[in-house]
Amino acid sequence: MTNNSTLIITVQNLTKFYKGYSEPALDNISLEIFEKDFFGFLGPNGAGKTTTISILTGITGFYSGNAFILNQNIRNFTNEIKTAIGVVPQDIALYPTLTILENLTYFGKLYGLKKDVLKDKIDFFINKLELQKKAKSKVSTLSGGMKRRVNLIAGILHNPKIIFLDEPTVGIDVYSKAVIIDFLRELNQNGVTIIYTSHQMEEAENLCNRIAIINSGKIKINGETSEILTQSNCKNMEELFLSLCK
């Protein structure tokens, strides 16, 4: 399918070095992500995925190049950019001794959500992700899949236009994975742009309308998923991935 949407993220010749390393973590990479994309950013461990997301979410700086979110240069990380993005990290970013409700109330207040609005949002997302029976349980008592669902809610309470997801389904049970994937599909269908990293190639192939594969800090391929697979003559995403990341 051809994407006629507006560019929402532009990365231009981005290079990043880490102190003590002679080789760049990112080597002159360029990307275009469109409004309403479900964009798969794929690569082996250490390829540069998390570094790229850390730059785009204002966590770390970069050596050279440019990046824009909503047509704004991220060197000046404005409140408009901050409120437009949601970040769901691979590590569980929750307080284990607090309940689901207490965690989500805390994060909602950090976003500046008013009490009644926050309560409605928490109730909606807890029901949507089938956590209502555990709402008053401490996070430390939850299964890995439930923790991932709460982690997801915590990153999107403010209804961001763009969500960065770093391995959102890693190491979880089949049921939780299905709940999360269905929810992400619905968010995307409702106009949210999703940037998603994963090692699950079949999952990425099924979810993402566009992908980029990165290895050793360099973009190996980038474009519409269906076109890339057709042009590569690979039978599936896993085969393509292995051919590019040897």
Image (cartoon, helix red, strand yellow):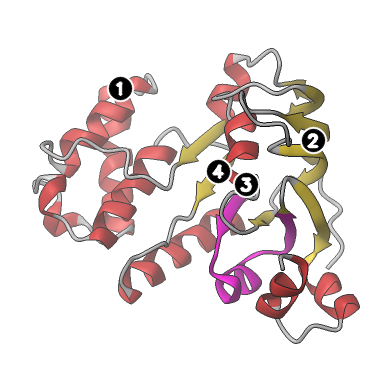
Mark 4 and mark 3: Cα distance apart in space:
11 Å
Mark 4 vs mark 3, foreground winner is 3
Q: Which quarter shows the C terminus?
A: bottom right
State the residue position of label 1: 109
**Residue 190 shows in this picture:** no
Q: Which residues are magenta?
A: 194-214
Q: Are marks 1 and 2 in contact (CB under 8 Å)?
A: no
Q: Are marks 2 and 3 in contact (CB under 8 Å)?
A: no
Mark 4 and mark 1: Cα distance apart in space:
21 Å
Mark 4 vs mark 1, foreground winner is 4
Quarter of the view holding residue 228: bottom right
Marked residue nearer the N-terminal end (4 or 2): 2
Marked residue nearer the N-terminal end (4 or 1): 1
User: What x and y, as percent, mark residue 160?
Assistant: 53, 36
Instruction: Give the SS element for disc 3.
Output: helix
Q: Is residue 212 above or below residue 109?
A: below
Mark 4 and mark 2: Cα distance apart in space:
15 Å
Marked residue nearer the N-terminal end (4 or 3): 3
Mark 1 and mark 3: Cα distance apart in space:
30 Å
State the residue position of label 2: 11
Instruction: Give the SS element for disc 2.
Output: strand
State the residue position of label 4: 164
